[in-house]
Amino acid sequence: MVQALNRKYILYFVLGTAIALFLIVAFIHPGHPSLQFQDKVPSLFKEKKKAPWLIATMSAAWSQQRRNVIRATWQHTYRSSGHFHTVFVIAKAKDHDLWEPLIRQENATWGDLVLLDHIEENRDIANTIKPIEFYKHLVHKHEAEGGEPWKFVSKIDDDSYLDATTFYNEFLLPRLTCNDTIIARYLSWAAMTGDKVDYPCPGGQFYTMSWDIVETLARLHTENPIQGLMEDGMLGKLLYEGKHPWELVRLNDSRAFDINEDTFHGQGMPPERPDLGPVEAMTMAVNPHKMKKDESYLKIAALFDEHGFKNKNG
């Protein structure tokens, strides 16, 4: 009887020691395990009530302040609509161990970071393959988890503002049953490259794809892993060379345009094309872009409320 009890206590001791060692390795030893934030947030595909639209903001791992600005502006202003879910997509910082505690704490607070830890965070990666690596991740998660995918997935830069309610009502709501669709600014492959062959490319600052296009792009890049080509040109090239038909719904220059921070002082939004009047630009805007300074971003955000641009009537 005594020997049996001793064996029982020894077993408990061994198990307790093993658990303690695991916790020490997992949570105290720096840099381990690798961050897999996408597995620490609620399932992307098994939610009982899911918004039809996923908006993924591309963000540098160390750009926490800009992420907080975005969370506090358009994400907060339009979230009550229930139309969209948001994530920030980051890659693995070069000084991973230095940034990991901050990023981990941020995700513990907000639960909205997706880490692509197989690619390094740098400007070249951000401008070329980072978005499509996210689409591959998204498709892989859907295949693993099942459930209903989103109707639409948007990619947006972190220097872009989005009037999410106006965009949803005007561009997505009428197309919830559409496939093979991208909503974006139009870019010409020939104009960008000087090539004699021409085809449309979606402007990279902000574009929205039906789910089947997300799957198609993930497959095409797996089959043809283009490297070093700017994101918007690469997407157009993949669809063109893959002979995949698709419709481009254009966001014209009155809806999506670049801000000139040197001339912008919060009293309207001068578009990149001077032939467009400022009144048209202000009243129609859904996606002002290129606010590199946080102050500029906040000034733009102050021109909008939950109904869109505040002074639509001039």
Image: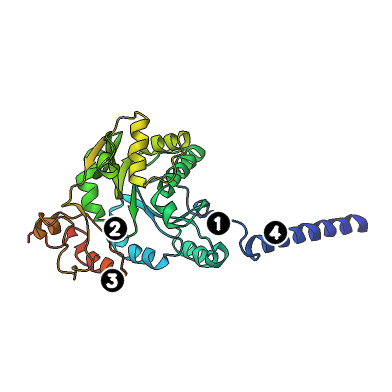
311 displayed left or right of 45: left
- Specify the amino acid type for callout 1: Leu
Q: Is residue 24 above or below residue 240?
A: below
Q: Which residue is mark 1?
A: 35
Q: Which residue is mark 2?
A: 160
Query: Which residue corresponds to mark 4?
Result: 22
State the SS at label 1: loop
Q: Is residue 54 above or below residue 291?
A: above
Disc 3, SS: helix
Q: Position of residue 202 (x, y in %)?
A: 29, 43
Residue 68 found in image quarter: bottom left
**Which x, y percent locates residue 77?**
27, 61
Front residue of this view, candidates 285 and 45: 285
Q: Position of residue 254 (x, y in %)?
A: 15, 52
Q: Mark 4 or mark 1: which comes first in sequence?
A: 4
**What residue is shown at x 33% (from left), y 45% (from top)?**
232
Which three-letter amino acid code belongs to the residue tagged 3?
Answer: Glu
| Quarter of the rendering containing residue 16 | bottom right
Say which element carries label 4. Answer: helix
Q: Do the CB atoms of the residues marked 1 and 3 lie less than 8 Å apart?
A: no
Which dot marks residue 295?
A: 3
* Secondary structure found at label 2: loop
Decide: few, some or many residues near mark 2? Use Cα within 10 Å; few <14, some 14-19, many ≥20: many
Towards the viewer: 106 or 189: 189
- Mark 1: few, some, or many residues within 10 Å (few <14, many ≥20)? some
